[in-house]
Amino acid sequence: MPRFQGPQIQRPPANFIIQENSYAERRMFPERDVAFHTTWVHTDVSGVSVLYIDGHAGSTTLEDVIAARERAVSAATDPDAIFGEIEVVEADGRKGWGWSQRVQSPSRGLVQVAYSAVIPYDTATWVLEFISGEPTLKSAAPDTLRTIISSFAIGRTRWNLPLIGLGFVGLFALAGFQRSRAKARADRLRSINLVTIKKEKPKDGEGESDDEGGVGGVGAA
């Protein structure tokens, strides 16, 4: 059973919550319509983390991803932005591509980290972009960001019909066994012959002598 139905990361970090409409889409492929959009968000005094998930119709090639990274490099406005090279990313049993990004300089330190990934399917493409300014995620980037993104999957509940059928057969067999035991017990109870035992009357004088002896003893004392 998937933790989340539909296109979602299946292992979100602790305290991350879904915010479907709070953040705008990330248009990695501006020429394509966005068919699906959601975000995972975590905010506290240490910083903000946002993971964007956007879906586009149609598959995607490595050439498309190379062009998207080049556009991202050209559009960067921070002079301290550093982009990693494209690498293979696996998610949901499929191979995609991704690259890391950070804003860092000797004077500013590590300001922000990010990871972008593209997971192509046969008829759809999923784009995930994870941006964080939180110290714990910055110190472990890009490995942690990549690992979280790699938990992405199309969550579907798949029913194992043969196994379910065996389960029903087992339940029916158990019910039949219980009924057989109950019937056998009822048959045993019906086969028992109940006999009435007559109570014997005391012999003459036996019970009375004991009572009188006892009373006489008390009176003598």
Image (tube, rainbow, N blue to C red):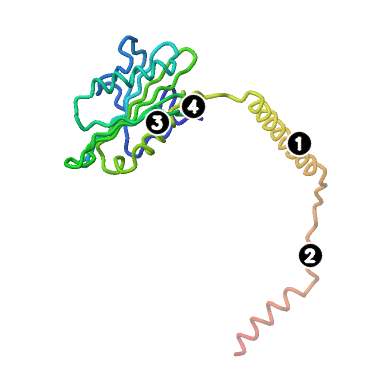
Q: CA distance from mark 2 to mark 1?
A: 46 Å
Q: Position of residue 111 (x, y in %)?
A: 22, 37
Q: Earlier in the sequence, mark 3 or mark 1?
A: 3
The tag on residue 201 is: 2
Circle 1 residue? 180
- Secondary structure at badge 2 equals loop
Kindly report which numbered mark, 2 or 1, lies closer to the viewer in this rendering: 1
Determine if residue 193 is in view.
yes
Q: Amino acid at mark 1?
A: Ser
Circle 3 residue? 149
- Residue 136 figure quarter: top left
Determine if residue 41 is in view.
no
Of 16 and 187, which appears nearest the observer? Answer: 16
* Label 2 packing within 10 angstroms: few (<14), some (14-19), many (20+): few
Q: Earlier in the sequence, mark 4 or mark 3?
A: 4
- Secondary structure at badge 3 equals helix
Where 52 falls versus 214 (above or below)?
Answer: above
Q: Earlier in the sequence, mark 3 or mark 2?
A: 3
